[in-house]
Amino acid sequence: MILDEEINIDATTKDLKLFADLMQHIIKFNRLVQAQNIELTLEEAVTLLALTDKYDCVDTRTAVRKRLAHLAGTSPWEVLYIACD
């Protein structure tokens, strides 16, 4: 099946690659046991959360949230702001 329409995903190439890599990693290992070890910046986490919500990727969302919980130790106010959004 070939799609003739463009799909607007509203994300940069870098963010899409990170999203796809994270999903592939989760699928490969079923779930990330040590999700807090994923290296993400707060900005990347916000972008990934938006993509996981948009495309309903539950396991990926869980992994990003675990990473945010880990980042709360060093950036509590930023993580609180993200959580409130």
Image: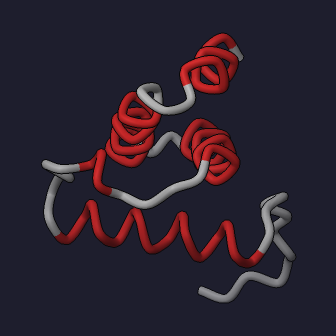
For the N terminus, give its image quadrant. bottom right
> Relative to 83, is 70 on the left or the right?
left
Res 24 quadrant in image: bottom left
> Relative to 40, is 30 on the left or the right?
left
Q: Residue furthest front?
A: 74
Q: Residue at x 64, y 18 (%)?
A: 77
In front: 2, or 36? 36
Q: Residue furthest bottom?
A: 2
Residue 48 image offset from top left, x and y in percent: 59, 49
Residue 52, placed above or below residue 75: below
> Relative to 16, is 73 on the left or the right?
left
Res 23 quadrant in image: bottom left
In front: 25, or 81? 81
Q: Residue at x 86, y 75 (%)?
A: 6
> Relative to 33, is 67 on the left or the right?
right
Residue 49 image offset from top left, x and y in percent: 58, 40
For the C terminus, give its image quadrant. top right
Total of numbered circles in the picture?
Answer: 0
Residue 8 image offset from top left, x and y in percent: 85, 64
In front: 24, or 3? 24
Q: Residue at x 65, y 70 (%)?
A: 16
**Figure coloring:** secondary structure
Residue 75, placed above or below residue 3: above
Q: Residue at x 30, y 45 (%)?
A: 36
Res 73 quadrant in image: top left
Residue 34, placed above or below residue 78: below
